[in-house]
Image: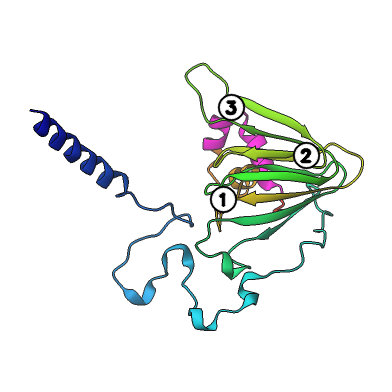
Amino acid sequence: MALKSFVLIIAILAVVTSISHASDPSPLQDFCVAVNDSMTTVFVNGKVCKDPKVVTADDFFKSGLNVAGNTSNNVGSAVTAVNVNNLPGLNTLGISLARIDFAPYGLNPPHTHPRGTEVLTVLEGTLYVGFVLSNPGPNMKNKLFTKILHPGDVFVFPIGLIHFQFNVGKTKAVAFAGLSSQNPGVITIANAVFGSDPPINNDVLAKALQVDKKVVNYLQSQFWWDNN
């Protein structure tokens, strides 16, 4: 009896282990449509590996993060990203980096990274930062977590959650962010909702936001600045 029980446990563990390793890896792009024509295909995640024989140190190197981004824009911030698109050596390593510059009272607007967690540290200035949790149960509001950050402080924004950073000081601010993906992606909420191409039907937005369609039309007519 003991032997039968032992064999059954081993069999269950084998099945569970096989299932746990059967899922697809997380994609690093918004979609990957299957095709049969090899002439119209791209590689998953859009990258192929360089022949190791011709790899050089420059493939793992990028300069320029000492240079401040141009914050003379509508939101008063600039994001300088370092990811697999401009640092090829990051391919398959699952990390990336960004420098974020803020003018006085500049904002990195509410946005989300669909493929990466962000850990942010402040080098200069004072930032008011926060993130909002996903939808809770019925008749409950999405909980907001916020913090005032000073130089040397660190804050984490969990993967996929809407978050923001706002310079509450009278001087410029600088922060650096590490992300847990070579290509974490970014969706700026206002830009996506009101600046999509083609526009989202104004009946949809008026109903969702519970406002008059004139308000939606006005918002869709605005220029939504991309600080990335």
**x%, y% of residue 108?**
73, 45
Indicate yes or no whether the magenta region holds residue 210: yes
CA distance for labels 1 and 3: 36 Å
Between discs 2 and 1, the one toward the N terminus: 2
Q: Residue at x 57, y 30 (%)?
A: 133
Residue count near mark 3 (Cα–Cα under 10 Å), binned few <14, some 14–19, many ≥20: few
Residue count near mark 2 (Cα–Cα under 10 Å), binned few <14, some 14–19, many ≥20: many
Between discs 1 and 3, the one toward the N terminus: 1
Residue 102 placement, left or right of 176: right
Residue 5 placement, left or right of 205: left
Q: Nearer the viewer, residue 210 or 182?
A: 182
Image quarter of residue 149: top right
**x%, y% of residue 60?**
62, 70
Q: Amino acid at mark 3?
A: Gln
Q: Which residue is mark 3?
A: 210
Marks 3 and 2 in Cβ contact (< 8 Å) = no
Residue 49 lies, with reference to residue 140, above or below; the image says below
- Image depth: mark 1 or mark 3 in front: 1
Between discs 3 and 2, the one toward the N terminus: 2
Q: Amino acid at mark 1?
A: Ser
Residue 228 seen in the figure = no
Highlighted magenta segment, given as a residue range: 204-223
The residue positioned farthest toward the front in the image shown: 2
**x%, y% of residue 38?**
33, 75
Marking on residue 166:
2
Q: Which residue is mark 1?
A: 180
Q: Residue at x 46, y 62 (%)?
A: 45
Q: Secondary structure at mark 2?
A: strand
Q: Amino acid at mark 2?
A: Phe
